[in-house]
Image (cartoon, grey):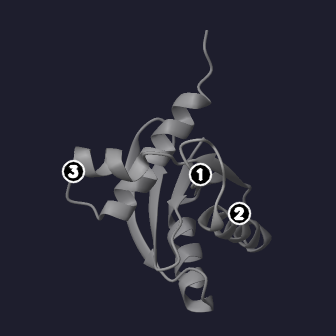
Amino acid sequence: MRVAALDYGQVRTGVAATDPTGTIVRPVGVVERVDEPEGLARLLDTLAAEAPELVVVGLPVSLDGREHAQAGRARAFARRLESVAPYPVTLYDERFTTTVARRRGGAAPLDARGAAVILEDYLRSHAETP
């Protein structure tokens, strides 16, 4: 199953996606200002090009698991995206993803690498064990 992930931000949102088998994750890019109509349209075009069956939106929570203002914005964004997108949207804990993305480095923008970390973690946590 092809899956995409978003590292949501009010200014920049990182996008990552899997290959058609749902096993190889790659950063796709960054879409700016997805809360505005033009930004949301660009995001929908980007996602359409990836043809996901599911979109995972990173949910920022504190180390103790409490949610703050940014988590509320991510939840609202996920609801808005699901209302206009042709696929389901789910939330996933994104603690430490930016730190991991920074440490890994790479040529892709940090937000896209963060989305890739979210997606890798999501896939690992939802892998079927024999």
Identify whether 18 is placed above or below 9: above
* SS for callout 1: loop
**x, y percent for residue 111:** 38, 63
Say whether disc 2 or disc 3 marks the residue closer to the N-terminus: 2
Q: What mark, if any, has residue 105 been given in the picture? A: 3
CA separation, marks 1 and 3? 23 Å
* SS for callout 3: loop
For badge 3, the amino acid type reads Gly
**Residue 68 relative to residue 114: left or right:** right
Identify whether 19 is placed above or below 41: above
Quarter in which the N terminus is drawn: top right
Q: Residue at x 21, y 50 (%)?
A: 105
Label 1 belongs to which residue? 61
Q: Is residue 107 visible?
A: yes
Label 2 belongs to which residue? 75
Which circle, 1 or 3, is nearer the viewer? 1
For badge 1, the amino acid type reads Val
Say whether disc 1 or disc 2 marks the residue closer to the N-terminus: 1
Q: Is residue 22 visible?
A: no
Of residue 48 and residue 15, the one placed in the foreground of this image is 15
